[in-house]
């Protein structure tokens, strides 16, 4: 596959012929588009002083969609050709039936570019990337003799998208992504613990490969590992919890964000269905989904239907004011699309998905949140989590957490899990810090078998009455 720019209507298809086929496939439908994509990605993993894997993937293809009511016909192919497009149109056309639909208005065009269009993989040669990973390994081991293993991953991807709509509108987006992850294992007196840190965004690899970037990342991964060396078993029971800023917003994303996606609410399978205009959170809680933040991992200049990304307020001062919508669900619910129609690739149908979801800052000094905690947990880092969209119940594991008693941060705790439900947790937010932070650029979100990059964020929060799973105190 060539590194030349992706120009499907110059190298693969005649635009007039493709438009004719698309119009025939969507005649009598309410919406539809031709989505064309080329994606290239690489990942290099150094583990325990050796290059463990070095991979490069490339793919291209198209997806053709015709939508009528709640039904969508979708067909995709890895071959971008007129013959493949005609076969796909016959399949997509099945959703239209006898027609009779009124076609939705096209998305509004935009000239906004939220990130550069350079290929991040071209920032350095393969040899330089290898050398950087080896430097990271050597630096981590030199920091502390207890370091026994280092894993570091450099990854980058470049997605090129073209969208053709039946009105003749053509949209294009070039989406870079880069990321550096570092994990450190330490050992002391026969006990081993791990710490990890990383991040990235929609930019090149060059900045991530500079020592002034990766050295602090290594130090933070080591700090977390050393903290966990001293961790004691977590207490168990119902207690108040202070969440740190930034990445702990993943709890907000999972426990609340998914429940505010339009399809779950249209189908009334969300815990927040039917609550528009009602108070669903404590006063002072304002939650946004914002795909317009420059260079952020979850940002998109346009979504995968061609709608411009937007700054969408979901909860305002505790009141539910909006859902995230793609074009189909927005039309069926009688509202406007919000720029949240996303898909993993050309082989997947779009659906409402989050971009960068975060809570705005409050007025409280984070120090006062902890000072007012009589007996609880201070959760700074999170690992995996699970949520049931229908009732909002969640379980999250903490990767860095501390016991707090009488306002004093005590020993780190190991094995803590936070258990609750999003609707209740929102109402039990007692204080909101003034220290809003976004995550470092590490989020991925799964839904219906599709994965897309996302961002999260929040200020420090004091939440009352969460169940902490651990060992009995």
Image: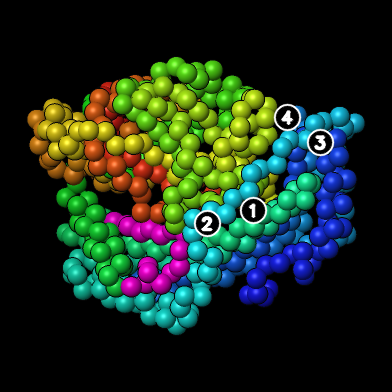
State which quarter of the image contains the N terminus.
bottom right
Nearest to the observer: residue 257 or residue 316 = 316
User: Badge 3: few (under 14), some or many (20 or more) residues near its Cα, within 10 Å?
Assistant: many
Q: x, y (%) of residue 204?
A: 45, 68
Nearest to the observer: residue 51 or residue 249 = 249
Residue 70 marker: 4
Residue 345 marker: 1
Q: Is residue 307 magenta?
A: no
Q: In this rendering, would 361 be left or right of 256? A: left
Q: Is residue 200 magenta?
A: yes
Closer to the chain start, of discs 2 and 1, is: 2
Q: x, y (%) of residue 409?
A: 13, 39
Q: Quadrant of residue 246?
A: top left
State which quarter of the image contains the C terminus.
top left
Element type at mark 1: loop
Closer to the chain start, of discs 4 and 3, is: 3
Answer whether residue 101 is visible to the viewer in this image: yes
Element type at mark 4: loop
Span of residues in magenta: 195-210
Which residue is the site of mark 3?
A: 29
Disc 1 from disc 3: Cα separation: 23 Å
């Amino acid at each position: 596959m060539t590194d030349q720019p992706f120009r499907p209507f110059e190298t693969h298809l005649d635009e007039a012929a493709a438009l004719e086929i698309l119009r025939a496939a969507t005649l009598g439908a309410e919406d539809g588009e031709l989505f064309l994509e080329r994606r290239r990605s690489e990942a290099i993993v150094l583990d325990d002083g050796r290059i463990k894997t070095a991979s490069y993937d490339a793919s291209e293809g198209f997806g053709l969609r015709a939508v009528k009511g709640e039904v969508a016909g979708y067909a995709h192919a890895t071959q971008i050709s007129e013959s493949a497009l005609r076969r796909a149109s016959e399949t997509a056309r099945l959703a239209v039936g006898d027609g009779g639909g009124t076609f939705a208005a096209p998305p509004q065009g935009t000239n906004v570019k939220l990130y550069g269009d350079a290929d991040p993989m071209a920032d350095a040669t393969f040899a330089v990337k290898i050398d950087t990973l080896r430097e990271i390994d050597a630096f981590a081991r030199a920091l502390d003799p207890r370091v026994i293993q280092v894993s570091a991953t450099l990854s980058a991807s470049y997605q090129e998208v073209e969208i053709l709509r039946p009105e003749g509108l053509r949209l294009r987006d070039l989406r870079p992504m880069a990321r550096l992850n570092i994990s450190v294992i330490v050992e002391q007196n026969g006990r081993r613990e791990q710490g990890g840190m990383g991040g990235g965004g929609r930019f090149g690899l060059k900045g991530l490969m500079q020592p002034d970037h990766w050295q602090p990342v290594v130090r933070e991964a080591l700090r977390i590992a050393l903290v966990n060396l001293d961790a004691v078993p977590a207490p168990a029971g119902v207690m108040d919890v202070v969440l740190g800023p930034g990445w702990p917003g993943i709890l907000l994303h999972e426990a609340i964000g998914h429940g505010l996606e339009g399809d779950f609410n249209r189908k009334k399978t969300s815990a927040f269905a039917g609550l528009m205009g009602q108070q669903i959170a404590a006063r002072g809680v304002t939650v946004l989904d914002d795909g317009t933040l420059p260079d952020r991992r979850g940002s998109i200049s346009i979504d995968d239907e061609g709608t411009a990304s937007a700054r969408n307020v979901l909860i305002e001062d505790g009141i539910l004011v909006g859902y995230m919508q793609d074009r189909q669900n927005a039309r069926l619910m009688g509202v406007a699309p919000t720029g949240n129609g996303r898909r993993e690739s050309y082989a997947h149908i779009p659906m409402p998905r989050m971009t960068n979801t975060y809570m705005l800052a409050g007025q409280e000094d984070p120090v006062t949140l902890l000072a007012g905690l009589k007996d609880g947990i201070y959760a700074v880092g999170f690992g995996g989590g699970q949520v049931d969209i229908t009732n909002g119940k969640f379980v999250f594991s903490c990767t860095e957490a501390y016991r707090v008693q009488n306002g004093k941060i005590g020993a780190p705790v190991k094995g803590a899990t936070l258990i609750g439900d999003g609707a209740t947790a929102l109402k039990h937010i007692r204080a909101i810090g003034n220290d809003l932070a976004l995550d470092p650029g590490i989020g991925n979100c799964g839904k219906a078998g599709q994965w897309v990059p996302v961002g999260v964020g929040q200020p420090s929060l004091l939440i009352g009455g969460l169940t902490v799973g651990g060992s009995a105190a």
